[in-house]
Structure formats: structure tokens, C-alpha cells
Amino acid sequence: MEDRPKGSSRRPKLLILGGFITLSVLAGWAGRKAIVAQIGYSLICSQVPRQTDLILVLGGDFYGPRVLTAADLAVAGYAPLVLISGPPYQDGRPEGEFAIDYLVSRGYPRKLFAVFGHKAYSTVDEAIALAPELRRRRVKRVILVTSAYHSRRADIVVRLFCDNGIQYISVPAPDSFYSPDRWWDDLGSRKMFFSEWRKIIGSVFLAFPRYLLSAWPRP
């Protein structure tokens, strides 16, 4: 009977154990990446578009995906009007006027668009400025269009500062500045992620309580 080399019976078990550990490490890393990527997607609030009274475009991107997304939604029949919000851009003219000229040059009907000009340069101030305008228009359901990375904060802010009993449906426009699936590995996306969450926390826990106090009836 031939003797086996010492330790040879353990080798298959060690190989199996080593393979199991390697697979576990790889699965753990893949799972970690999936979880971190999911956290990156937390900034994006995306809902299925429905028939509404109005499509509202927040200021800040009047030559790009925001206004184009809103225009396509209007053409598809989701609302009879696109209201383009924004502060002055040039010669006192609000962003929306330039956006409409741009959209008309691309073949969209001018009658689909209206402008709401204001002097707000933050999302909170913009929502506060929009509240009386939306109240005046008596809208009950609004599609909210902004950049994808900004959509979660915008959705939270309009519900806090521009409620009016309105049902908001968030339809984010695509953007190339934020990569949710690898935000931790891209400097610009990483800065955007932390900046947006800092602003969300500030809006909810600082700006909103101040807003309530300022609106509270004084004796």
C-alpha cells in the first residue's frame, strides 16, 4: 500500500476554503458597492408622470435638459402649460424668457410656455416666491422638473415651503454632472452628494423652522 504525502489530504479542503473566502470577499465588496451606489441614488426623486395642471421648471438650467424635459412632457400631453421659473439673467430679463426663445428655436410651440420671474437665488427662496403664483393659478397637481441630483431636495423643499395643497410629481431631467452609481469615486459627484445632503438637512431643520416662526401670527 502506497503512503500518501503528508498533508495531501488537507489540500482539497484548503483549496475549497480559500475559494470560499475569496468569493465571500468579492461578494462582500460587490455588495458594499451596491449599497453605496444605492445611497447615491437617494438624491434622485423620480416618479411616473401623470396628467397635471402645470409643469414647473425650477431655475438654473434654461438652455439644457430641464427645459427640454419639461417641453417634451408638455408635447406628450401631460400638462397644457410649462411655467419656467428663474431669476434675472441679462438686462433684467428672467431666465425663462431666454429659455422660451431657445425652445422655440428647437421647434416647440411658444404657446406651451410661460415665465415666472423672481429674485430668489436659493431653492427655498424660490419655493416661497412660487407659492402665491401657484395659488393664483389654482393648480392642484404639478409636475416638478429639475436636474436629477437636485430632485430630492427640490421635492422636499416645495412640499415644505410651497404646499398650497398641491400634489407634486417629480420628473427629474438627466444631467451629466452627477454619477449616482459611482459618486464616491468621482470628485465632482462626491462634492455634489455631500453638498446636497447638507442643504437638505439645512432646509428641513434650520430654514423650515425659521419660516414657520416668521409666518406665526404675532400678538
Image: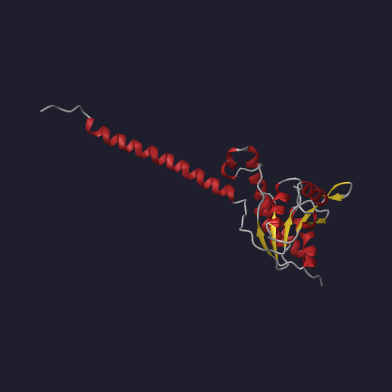
Which corner quadrant holds the C terminus?
bottom right
In this orientation, does residue 204 appear? no
What colour scheme was applied to this rendering of the protein?
Answer: secondary structure
Q: Nearer the viewer, residue 81 or 129?
A: 81
Task: Specify the farthest residue to the left.
Answer: 1
Q: Residue 136 sits in which quadrant?
A: bottom right
Can you give x and y, in whole percent of width and height, for residue 47 in the image? 61, 57
Can you give x and y, in whole percent of width and height, for residue 140 in the image? 71, 67
Can you give x and y, in whole percent of width and height, for residue 115 in the image? 81, 56
The number of numbered badges drawn on the structure is 0
Q: Nearer the viewer, residue 51 or 120?
A: 51
Decide: is 167 above or below 182: below
Which corner quadrant holds the N terminus?
top left
Which residue occupies 81% across, 70% down?
A: 218
Judged left or right of residue 56, residue 91 is right
Decide: is 55 above or below 28: below
In this orientation, does residue 16 appear? yes
Q: Nearer the viewer, residue 156 or 49?
A: 49
Which residue occupies 76% across, 64% down?
A: 213
Judged left or right of residue 195, residue 16 is left
Decide: is 81 above or below 14: below
Can you give x and y, in whole percent of width and height, for residue 164 in the image? 73, 67
Task: Specify the farthest residue to the bottom.
Answer: 219
Which residue occupies 21% across, 28% down?
A: 6
Judged left or right of residue 193, residue 80 is right
